[in-house]
Image: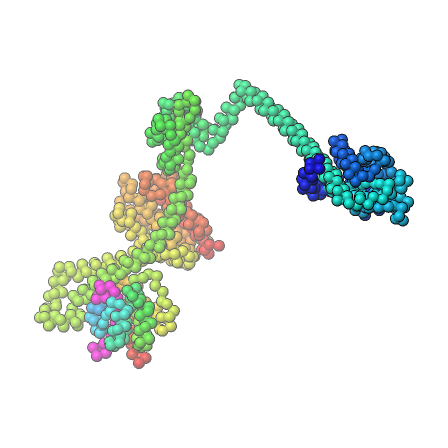
Amino acid sequence: MSASAVRVLIVDDESSIRCSLVNYLEDRGCTVVSAESAEEAIEMLETEPVDVAIVDIRLPGMDGNGLILAAHEMLPSLKFIVYTGSVAYRLPPALAEIGAGTDYVFQKPLPDLKVLLEAVNRLATEGAALA
Amino acid sequence: MTVHIESETPSAHGSDSEGQRESAHEHGTAIEAPPPAPEPQSGGQLARPHVPAEVVAKWQRVVDLMARTVRVPAGLIMRVVPPQIEVFVSSRTEGNPYDKGERADLGTGLYCETVMARRAQLLVPHAMKDPQWSHNPDIDLGMIFYLGFPVQWPDQSVFGTICILDSRENPDAIEYVELLTEFKEIIESDLAGLSMECDRRRVEDELQEAQNTLEARVAERTASLTNAVDDLQRELSERRRPEVTQDLRHLLEHMIDSMPSTLVAVDGRGCVTHWNRHAEECLSVPTTHAEGQPIEKVFPTVSPHLVQVKDALRERRAQSARRTESYVDREKRYHDVMVYPLVGDGIEGAVVRVDDVTERVRLEDMMIQSEKMMSVGGLAAGMAHEINNPLAGIMQNAQVVLDRACTDLPMNLEVARELGLDMDLLSAYFERREITSMLESVRKSGRRAAKIVQNMLDFSRKSNTQFAYHDLGELLDKTVELAATDYELKQSNLFRRIEIVRDYDSTLPKINCERMKLQQVILNLLKNGAQAMCEEDAPPKTPRFILRTARDQQTARIEVEDNGPGMGEDIRRRVFEPFFTTREVGKGAGLGLSVSYYIVTENHGGTMTVTSSPGHGARFIIRLPLEGRS
């Protein structure tokens, strides 16, 4: 299992959310790295191998949408999950074009993090099948 | 003499041009130009200025001097008087055959005729030697020598000539051409002066005439003004007669009675001296009962404003209070109260004016209310984000803590083993100390908070203010959830005790409606019902709502029934009136049911009714068209 562990990047500026997500996913066997900002995440992607990125939208500096576009540019196989507290969030057309789907947009707070874990596994399987 | 003449000349010449233009234009000319006169001047009716005696006398001296100086028997000034020519002035010299006033016909070949026709001087040295002049009439008088100059009015029309004649050839005379020209100019400058004088007189006459007209008009106007003043004075003195004063008094009373304000006059002690009709009607106190009474006794609305009445009387300054509240038949009314002192000779007192501004205040309140709703919508979205993030932090961490306390996660067992910790014992400890259930409780509270935010959003989100098909049962349930989170209801801790009985028709199709607005209606009913059930002195043992949906012919029926105290007919009939409230002042605007009524009837084309009787609860019935709003 650990050999084929799904590699996840979590980007959120709120530490209570970011750390609990890291802990939860690690407990479930994922290999997790995290970043507080989009800029830090981009830097991380240059060295860390990642399958799925869980991205908050409202971030200091570059926002989540910008990050997804930039990261896709760098790693076209990378999959994305949007996890936002903004109730008015609509997936921008540019993101839909690169394959981000509304099924992978989640509203904070999630009553059970299991749905996030399932989404991560689904996307990882998808990516593996394509590869 | 010469000096005197010369000094006159320039000034005469100076005004010449003007004089010429004026007279040429105004008068035309009186002279029929002698043939073959080149100018087509027609004879005007106006006479040339009269040459006064003193000028004639002067000319006489000029002609005498001239004749003597040049040593000729005849020096003449001729004046044309169509169709003749007249000797106007003749020198008093020896051998002069011409007499003053003597006339000769024109067109007979006279020397002077030629001078006038050509407007040029003429010298005939010896007529007998000149075939052109050898047969002219003056030869009969023995005058064979002629030197003449035309004399003209300032407008260039011909007056006549000035000339000298001799019975012999007079070679010296030629030397005198210059002198004669001077004389000619003297005559002409006199003529110019006469013209000017004439013009001046004419202008003066016209001025005089204009002045006369003006004076006549002024006199006329003054007369009519005087008449008007007289009339006015007569009328005024008539008005002072008693019956006229009476009329005026009636008019004023009518004006005061017709005013849509309550107008009450009080004397210095605050007793009523005048009570208008509006006061009679609004306060149901006839004038006869009110007059002489202290104002607070007959006009309770004013009681709180007595101090203002006193102030107005004392300080002689207007006082006012706006939007004062009072209850009339359990209905809140608003009034503007204005008190102003009576100002006049020997009058002490004040006028109290009260206007009912309830309608205006209600409209303003309604606008404020709808603005509040709008701003809540905007706030909710921003607030939701702020709440959702920390909420996620709380809920996620609680979940992870729970995860790490359980025995089935491989990683937990691995760490426990490393530490030599008995996982089963730890788990038992957590159970015994209720740590697990407390953490579950944290998650549960988090979920509830999230739901509250969601409901609030749904309720206020603008995108939901559109018609769509909704299941009424579902809509009712969501509203119950919303009501459970309502602050006012929560404070009374009542809603939790209320039993909810659902009786939904599962075959009822979805209804086209505005979900948010319909939820607002149901929420209002739930809140009112809950309040009624709780505020009653003897609340029902089990407060209960029965929510029903049913199909009723072409309508969907929603019922919200409570088992509260119910209401009497008097209240039941008024519950949908705006601002009607049975609650104490300051609790609720009394808008809820009227807004609900509006939403159901106006927005959805439905009906809203209520059945109730005291002690038997209330049942609100909403009917919505099945096909949605047409």
Q: Quadrant of residue B541?
A: top left
In the image, residue B52 lies at what x, y percent?
75, 32
Residue at the image position 36 percent from the left and 49 percent from the top = B372
Q: Quadrant of residue B434?
A: bottom left
Q: Residue furthest left?
A: B420
In the rendered image of this protein, does residue B21 appear above or below residue B353? Answer: below
Residue at the image position 74 percent from the left and 31 percent from the top = B54
Residue sitting nearer the eye, B382 or B45 = B45
Residue sitting nearer the eye, B102 or B300 = B102
Can the viewer see residue B28 in this picture? no
Residue at the image position 21 percent from the left and 58 percent from the top = B441
Q: Quadrant of residue B53?
A: top right
The residue range painted magenta reads A1-20
Residue sitting nearer the eye, A18 or B567 = A18
The reply, left or right, for residue B503 in relation to residue B344 is: left
Residue at the image position 62 percent from the left and 26 percent from the top = B222
In the rendered image of this protein, does residue B108 appear above or below residue B424? Answer: above
Q: Residue furthest bottom?
A: A131
**Can residue A16 be found in the magenta stretch?**
yes
The reply, left or right, for residue B94 in relation to residue B336 is: right
